[in-house]
Image (cartoon, grey):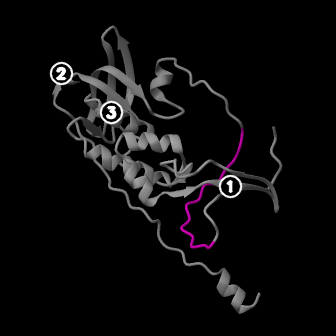
Amino acid sequence: MNSQHKAHMSAEFTSYPFTAKRYGAATPHLAHGVDAKRRPVVVVGGGPVGMVAALGLANHGIPVVLIEADDSVCFGSRAICISRRSLEIMERIGAIEGFNRIGLPWTGGRSFYRDVEVLKFSMPQDENQKHAPMVNLAQYHIEQIFLDQVETRSDLIEVRWQTKVTAIEQDDHGARLTLSTSDGSYQLDADWVVAADGGRSFVRESMGLALKGTSYEGRYVIVDILLESARPAERLAYRLSAPRW
């Protein structure tokens, strides 16, 4: 390999482009081990779904307690593709500015099996469309955008970090949650509970509520890379082996 080719192939690696703020646990005022204030809605899970649910409720004037077991937004990517319909929802809850500012919009893509192109597609996009058909954005950015918006609604949304749901009981008036923190456990009464704690939801499992849907086996690697390139922005997918249907 000649020196010119080596120079062309070289890359400069930088540190991870995101540092999240960490949050400590907080315990509310208790009466005999129970939160002294009954809550209209508790959302369990502070990921994208949980924060969007909290923001949507707050937009209707409904107070929300948002429970999150971690101490910050996620590290690394999980969901990275945001559809036009999702962007419309982001606009409705007041969080679209961040997506437009740092998201990577695209209108089509190609798929390859090894070095052979097997699919090429494009999605509708013209002057009548307000948002791009699809935007790519690392999930830590997505969650941070939502969290920034959540923090502007502190009048109606209370986030309890490092708080884990360990039990839930349902009655005619709502539900009682048992919550665990580093400072100890307490209980919380709520009229409604939203289970946004992921595909392996503790809340759904505790109540015998199955997650229905279809799935298939696949292995993927998601890597966040900041790349300067003259290539058009498009979705590229590469397969090294034939799919098993």
Instruction: Please provide percent x and percent y for residue 160.
Output: 29, 38
- Count of numbered tags: 3
> In the displayed image of the protein, which residue is found farthest to the top?
172
Pointer 2 residue: 32
Q: What residue type is labelled 2?
A: His
| Residue 180: mark | 3
Q: Which amino acid does label 1 sit on?
A: Gly
Disc 1 and disc 2: Cα gap in Å? 58 Å
The stretch of residues the image draws in magenta is 217-230
Pointer 1 residue: 109
Q: Which of 7 and 62 is in front in this view?
A: 62
Q: Is residue 222 left or right of residue 1?
A: left
The residue at the point 36 percent across, 40 percent down is: 93
Q: Does dot 3 land on a helix, a strand or a loop?
A: strand
Mark 3 or mark 2: name the one nearer the start of the chain.
Answer: 2
Q: Does dot 2 land on a helix, a strand or a loop?
A: loop
Mark 1 or mark 2: name the one nearer the start of the chain.
Answer: 2
* Picture quadrant where residue 223 is located: bottom right
Q: Badges 3 and 1: C-beta atoms under 8 Å apart? A: no
Image height check: is 74 above or below 191?
below
> In the displayed image of the protein, which residue is found farthest to the bottom?
3
| Image quarter hosting the N terminus | bottom right
Q: Nearer the viewer, residue 109 or 142?
A: 109
Instruction: Please provide percent x and percent y for residue 149.
Output: 31, 46
Residue 223 colored magenta? yes
